[in-house]
Amino acid sequence: MIVEATDTVWPRSHDSVRLIRADHLHSAVADGRIAFGTDLADGHLLDTALPHPGLVTAHELLTSKVMIVDDEEVNVRVVRKQLQRLGYRNLSSMTDPAEVISELHRQQPDVVLLDVMMPEVSGFEILEAMQADNSLRAIPVLILTAMSDRKTRLSALELGANDFLEKPIDQAELAPRVRNALMIRACQKQLRSYAEDLRTAVLQRTRQLSRSRLEVVHCLARAAEFRDDDTGQHVIRVGHFAKLIAHHAGMPRAFVDMIGFAAQLHDVGKIGIPDAILQKPGPLTEKEFDFMRRHCDMGNRVLSASHVGENVLFGIDRSEHSDDDTMMEPEEMWVSPVSGMAATIAMTHHEKWDGSGYPNGLSGEDIPIEGRITAIADVFDALSSKRPYKEAFPIERCFEILREGRGSHFDPELLDVFLSCRPEIEQIQRENREES
Ligand SMILES: [Fe+2]
């Protein structure tokens, strides 16, 4: 980048230093000959080619918002004139210190040149107020002061000032100090924008991950159902019914959303039940039924994080990866609220309120609520669906059978909640019919 000198050459040996007249500034900026970093002396622009091209362009630098705060109009005029000569074009000024904070909020300048000695509200008070305000704290402040004593400087630094300019302002000093403050501001903005981009990317990735995890949940649920319900609609309806009960029982939103997915996996343990038992046309023998009962524990083992180390899932043998640092720990792989809830549901959806269920004979509120909810959803859907060995019962008959189990099979309160939702239940049935 070379900018032709039109007048005298500035007496510096650095190759990147060039001079142009101030009135050539805008065209030089506009066509990109100046990257950033400008000083102006005696009507000339000095391009110093600072070491981080790309961070901020001269155009961005010179159009940054600079606010001058001084109760003396004449002082404001002097600084304004100097900044204009340096090429800054976006200047504002305040002579009433009482209005400064509201103007800072309105204008959000990139740097403030702040007088200390002002009537009514001092520069220190303004600094203090800026520090206490999240939206103003990051704005760099250069203190304009006639006082050069150590105490004033320390107080200003303590209150968050970035730098000082002694009155009368020396333009050669003003240029680098304003520029440096604006560079700090540019860095802050870039960092903020980077953090925002990162946050957006993480959110997007998390959503994708969550979506793909839920797809896996559904695929796993369908795989378990495939042998006796190849449409997969049963698991979807059970998820909807469980969600409906949880919602009307006043459970928190996160729980309601989660059970809609987790309940779909209630019978995932059927993967481990042989076809000869699962698809047997007639009634099961006691021994076969004992084996069938094991689907609760099997489902729990498939879904529970504590068993991943036993390589239940996908045959992963961690011993083969003992030197692989990229291998995630089991907890990182599978501890998720959905799989945790699904494991509980798999284990407890055949427990009964009176303790006569299986596999552990739990009773009442010892049965986790997600298991009690899914029990109602599962039994209702089995009753109201057509199966190879039976027709679908009408909804009145299903409700009658459920009522017979009130307080024995089912949690009475949760059952009442479910039975009071007939219109929504019928809507779920309409929207999730078996495909013929
Ligand atoms: Fe089951």
Image (cartoon, rainbow, N blue to C red):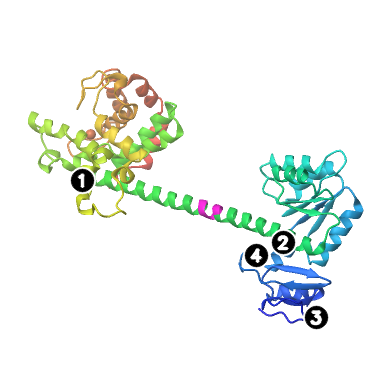
Alpha carbon separation for disc pair 2 and 4: 11 Å
Alpha carbon separation for disc pair 3 and 4: 28 Å
Whether residue 381 is visible to the viewer of this picture, yes or no, is no
Ligand 1 quadrant in view: top left
Q: Nearer the viewer, residue 210 or 15?
A: 15
Dots 2, 1 in contact, CB < 8 A = no
Label 1 within 8 A of ligand 1 by Cβ: no
The residue under label 4 is 56
Position of 242 relative to 314 (above/below): above
Position of 163 relative to 427 (above/below): below
The crowding category of the residue bearing disc 1, from other C-alpha atoms within 10 Å (few below 14, some 14 to 19, many at least 20), is: few
Residue 179's disc is 2
Alpha carbon separation for disc pair 3 and 2: 24 Å
The residue under label 1 is 311
Q: Earlier in the sequence, mark 3 or mark 2?
A: 3
Give the secondary structure at mark 1. loop
Residue 25, given in percent of the width and then of the height, sits at 77, 73
Give amino acid for label 2: Arg
Give amino acid for label 1: Asn
Q: Write the start and end of the magenta stretch as one range.
A: 195-199
Give the secondary structure at mark 2. helix
Give amino acid for label 4: Val
Position of 330 relative to 415 (above/below): below
